[in-house]
Image: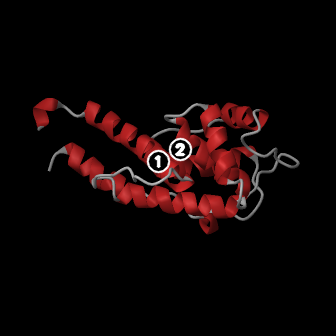
């Protein structure tokens, strides 16, 4: 088995946390950074910083913390933003998040998004067909999620030594 095949199998087994797996207590900035990075690093191999969080709050992508404490809502927002940030601009992400939460609370939007992310992770080696029906929120989310995942896969492929295959 090549190193890429090993990486792909491990990558496809990764999972993002469900809403109920996010801490249900208020966290300070350092705790938020630690928790978000715990979830993101195995998949995205990237880390969120205090500067990034402050920027997202300033741009109103993330709710302002109350008394410097962050809730489950902000953790969910940070996970979605950080996931999409690997490929999309902050303006595009803001439009996606606004659309996702236009007709449902953040908890429901995040829960649906996590189902899609985890399903796309495990189905990464299966082809995706673009539906012929009218574009929907779910279709745009699936394509956006696949875009991020394929970027990560292509980055891993670039790292593979061609002599090892």
In this picture the colour scheme is secondary structure
Which residue is painted at 65% across and 40% down in the image?
Answer: 95
Mark 2 surroundings within 10 Å by alpha-carbon count, few (fewer than 14), some (14 through 19), many (20 or more)? many
Name the quadrant containing residue 161. top left
Position above or below: 131 against 95? below
Q: Is residue 13 visible?
A: no
Of all residues, the one furthest to the right in this rendering is 67
Q: Nearer the viewer, residue 25 or 89?
A: 89
The answer to whether residue 74 is seen in the rendering is yes
- What residue do we see at 46% from left, 52% from top? 142
Looking at the rendered image, the disc whose residue lies closer to the viewer, 1 or 2, is 1
Q: What secondary structure is marked by label 1?
A: helix
Q: Residue at x 32, y 36 (%)?
A: 154
In the rendered structure, are the residues bearing label 1 and label 2 in contact, judged by CB atoms less than 8 Å apart?
yes
Residue at the spot 54% in from the left edge and 41% down from the top edge: 84
Residue 14 found in image quarter:
bottom left
User: Circle 2 is placed at which residue position?
Assistant: 83
The crowding category of the residue bearing disc 1, from other C-alpha atoms within 10 Å (few below 14, some 14 to 19, many at least 20), is: many
Q: Nearer the viewer, residue 146 or 132?
A: 132
Q: Looking at the rendered structure, which numbered label has been put on residue 145?
A: 1
The image quadrant where one finds the C terminus is top left
Relative image position of residue 67 (x, y in whole percent): 88, 48
What residue occupies the far bottom of the structure in this picture?
A: 20
What is the x, y in percent for residue 118?
A: 45, 59
- Give residue 99's position: percent from left, percent from top: 66, 49
Q: Residue furthest front?
A: 133
| Distance from the alpha carbon under mark 1 to that under mark 2 | 8 Å
Callout count: 2
Q: Earlier in the sequence, mark 1 or mark 2?
A: 2
């Amino acid at each position: 088995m090549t190193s890429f095949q090993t990486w792909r199998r491990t990558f496809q087994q990764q999972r993002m946390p469900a809403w109920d797996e996010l801490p249900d207590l208020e966290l300070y900035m350092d705790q938020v950074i630690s928790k978000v990075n715990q979830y993101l690093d195995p998949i995205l191999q990237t880390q969120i910083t205090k500067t990034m969080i402050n920027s997202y709050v300033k741009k109103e992508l993330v709710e302002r913390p109350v008394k410097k404490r962050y809730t489950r809502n902000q953790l969910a927002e940070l996970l979605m933003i950080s996931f999409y940030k690997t490929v999309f601009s902050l303006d595009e992400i803001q439009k996606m998040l606004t659309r996702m939460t236009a007709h449902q609370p953040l908890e429901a939007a995040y829960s649906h998004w996590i189902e899609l992310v985890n399903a796309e992770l495990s189905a990464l080696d299966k082809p995706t067909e673009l539906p012929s029906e009218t574009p929907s929120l779910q279709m745009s989310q699936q394509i956006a999620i696949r875009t991020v995942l394929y970027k990560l896969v292509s980055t891993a492929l670039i790292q593979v030594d061609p002599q090892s295959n």
